[in-house]
Amino acid sequence: MIEFLLHNEKITLTDIDPNTTVLQFLRVHKKLTGTKEGCASGDCGACTICLVELDENNQLRYKTVNACITLVSALQGKQLISIEALKQSQLHSSQQAMVDNDGSQCGFCTPGFVMSLFGLQKNHDHFNRHQTHQALAGNLCRCTGYRAIENAAKQMFEQPIVDHFDPLEESIQQQLAQINLNTQRDSAMLALNDNYCHLPNDSDTLAHLLINNPQSTLIAGGTDLSLAITQHNTRFSQLIALSNVKELHQYTISDHQIEIGAALSLTKCQKIFQQTIPEFAALLDRFASLQIRNQGSIGGNIANASPIGDTPPALIALGASLILRRGDSRRSVKVEDFFVDYRKTVLESSEFIEKILIPIPTQPYLFKIYKVSKRLDDDISALSAACLLSLENEKVTKICLAFGGMAAIAKRAYHTEKALENQHWGLAAVKSAQPALEQDFTPLSDFRASSQYRMQVAKNVLHKLLIETPQVTDKSDELTAKTRISDYV
């Protein structure tokens, strides 16, 4: 049984297939068809809904997610708001702004855009172009274009109203708090026929569940795992959802290290990195869409073991490590040693990622992350690179170069690092080291990029790193510090 609020109504779900998506629940089970299915893969945003949850200060936090790849287990202890809830006696300000600014033509994508605008308004008190672009980057419109929708966002903030959600906030807080209190006493579970989903509420319960059910599949945000359901018609018979495991959503920051629970969302990770490792935060601006970052977890991105995952190269370059747990036993593994082969890791049966430990680089250092993709926003990398560099009198004292998209796993360029160590950091050293990348990698060709393209871009990344190193005089006269990789590949 799970409990949540649908709009303002308390819902208790018992007999439902845990493979059911929130989109299916709304459209099929509740006949609320305003939320549309466009891609069933979290790419188009037509299915955007808003989930409201209590934060660490017991305040309501609104987050937009893709209903098409969010399983119903994620609703436990939250409020689900779909497009049907916005209009009362009059259109909601997000809806009215879309009407006034001609933000809709065919209208299929409009419910998703409205929900993204609604979430934007709930989380911010004034118009900001960057925040608006981030909020809308996961919504695709093939009719109107985005200028009218951006104008709608501006009007929404300039003509604010007290909507019908505001007076109910205290009541929603109390109801969600009570549901969560009930969950702390009894872990939730969904089941139908032979399909089960357990929702443990602490790490100990999770560890013992995995020992007793080693065949279970873990689901955190599910932004990748759910594609097996929606795209390949897979049905998981044994799921364990991590959304309620409190330790996996916690974090601590010390002077030298960040400790992050594996199920912490990428949106929350981004806020942490803004304070500590700004380059990492900037990378997450380009990680999929806001809907995906709100739901996806950092541990899931690592455990997924994709060679083009965005976070592993950065974590490898920073020297991050993982705490892996099996039952009551724990072990520490460097992120660079976690990946074995394509989609294969060192995780043993019943073992899971509990924490990620990320050292905070100390001065003097230069940390850079480069992501090369066909689109700036909401796209998968053709190649990514993370570089941690320390210099003393323009001599390389430490360098760590990690690449994604160059091999079956994210990995370091050891030969290239060795070629640069103890060298004067300048154009001659970079040109001398670039051929070493061919010893480190033999990249594949696929629909994102050819092998030759990937290798050339990897070599250019070294040059760009040199260009972007402050107070180094020996740089190329062919390029400037403002040049982007895409300009000279």
Image (tube, rainbow, N blue to C red):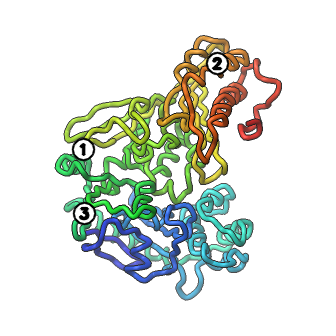
Marks 1/2: CA distance? 42 Å
Local crowd at mark 1 within 10 Å, few (<14), some, or many (≥20)?
many
Task: Report which residue position mark 1 lands on.
Answer: 350
Local crowd at mark 3 within 10 Å, few (<14), some, or many (≥20)?
some
* Residue at x 44%, y 78% (from the top left corner): 27
Picture quarter containing residue 134?
Answer: bottom right
Q: Would residue 276 be seen by someone viewing this image from the given angle?
A: yes
Picture quarter containing residue 1?
Answer: bottom left
| x and y percentages locating residue 256 in the rendered image | 45, 29
Q: Is residue 215 above or below residue 338?
A: below
* Residue at x 27%, y 61% (from the top left corner): 237
Task: Report which residue position mark 3 lands on.
Answer: 196
Residue situated furthest bottom in the rendering: 89
**Residue 413 or residue 201, whichever sits in front:** 413
Q: Amino acid at mark 3?
A: Tyr
Look at the numbered disc 1 and give the secondary structure of its residue.
Answer: loop
| x and y percentages locating residue 347 in the rendered image | 31, 38
Q: Is residue 91 above or below residue 348?
A: below
Marks 3/2: CA distance? 53 Å
Answer with mark 3 or mark 1, whichever residue precedes in sequence.
3
Marks 3/1: CA distance? 17 Å
Local crowd at mark 2 within 10 Å, few (<14), some, or many (≥20)?
many
Answer with mark 3 or mark 2, whichever residue precedes in sequence.
3
Q: Is residue 330 above or below residue 158?
A: above
Residue situated furthest right in the rendering: 477
Q: Amino acid at mark 2?
A: Ala
Q: Would residue 158 be seen by someone viewing this image from the given angle?
A: no
| x and y percentages locating residue 352 in the rendered image | 30, 43
Task: Report which residue position mark 2 lands on.
Answer: 433
Q: Amino acid at mark 1?
A: Ser
